[in-house]
Image: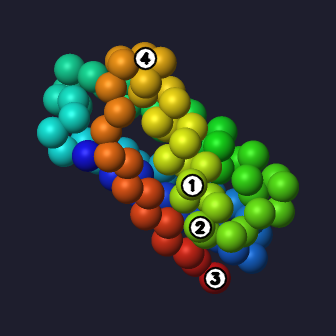
Amino acid sequence: ILTVVVTLSKENKTIVAGPDIISRGFVYVRESENLIENAKEVVTQALLECLEGRNVDWGKIKMVVKDSLGEYLWKTMRRSPMILPIIMEVE
């Protein structure tokens, strides 16, 4: 399981904190720091594209995060873990 935690500002349409990726049973983080850093970059790019398009529908943003990260991990490792995006909102 990969949990992706990000905090967004709905008003400014910006990323306030994160994304943080927590791995449980998928990869050992200390041995896969490079993979996790690249995954964070993939998630950040996906979020920025959503926010640039003025898309603040949380369901759509979660789906974009899952799809982009899932595609990256499949291309890189040929594995597809369960991805749980958690989006927190600040006013």
Label 3 neighbourhood size at 10 Å, few (<14), some (14-19), many (20+)? few
User: Colour scheme of this structure image?
Assistant: rainbow
Q: How packed is label 1: few (under 14 Cα within 10 Å), some, or many (20 or more)?
A: some
Q: Which residue is drawn at 27% across and 22% down?
A: 32
**Looking at the picture, how far across and down is residue 90, in whole percent?**
58, 77
Decide which of tag 4 and tag 2 comes sooner along the chain. Answer: 2
Give the crowd class for mark 4: few <14, some 14-19, many >=20 residues within 10 Å: few
Q: Name the residue under label 2.
A: 59
Nearer the observer: mark 3 or 4; the answer is 4
Looking at marks 3 and 4 on the same chain, the residue that comes earlier in the sequence is marked by: 4
Residue drawn at x 44%, y 57% is: 85
Which quadrant holds residue 51?
A: bottom right
Which amino acid type corresponds to the residue marked 3 in the rendered image? Answer: Glu
Q: Which quadrant holds the C terminus?
A: bottom right
Residue holding disc 3: 91
Q: In the rendered image, which residue does mark 4 sit on?
A: 76
Query: Which label's residue is closer to the chain start, 3 or 2?
Result: 2
Horizontally, residue 41 falls left or right of residue 91, namely left
Give the distance between the C-alpha atoms of the residues marked 4 and 2, in whole angstroms.
Answer: 26 Å
Q: Can residue 6 be seen in this view?
A: yes
Badge 1 or badge 4: first in the primary sequence: 1
Q: Where is residue 80 in the image (x, y as percent from the top left)?
A: 35, 33
- CA–CA distance in space, label 1 to label 4: 20 Å
Above/below status of 59 relative to 25: below
Q: Which of marks 3 and 1 is nearer the N terminus?
A: 1
Q: For the residues labelled 1 and 2, say whether their Cβ atoms are less than 8 Å apart.
A: yes
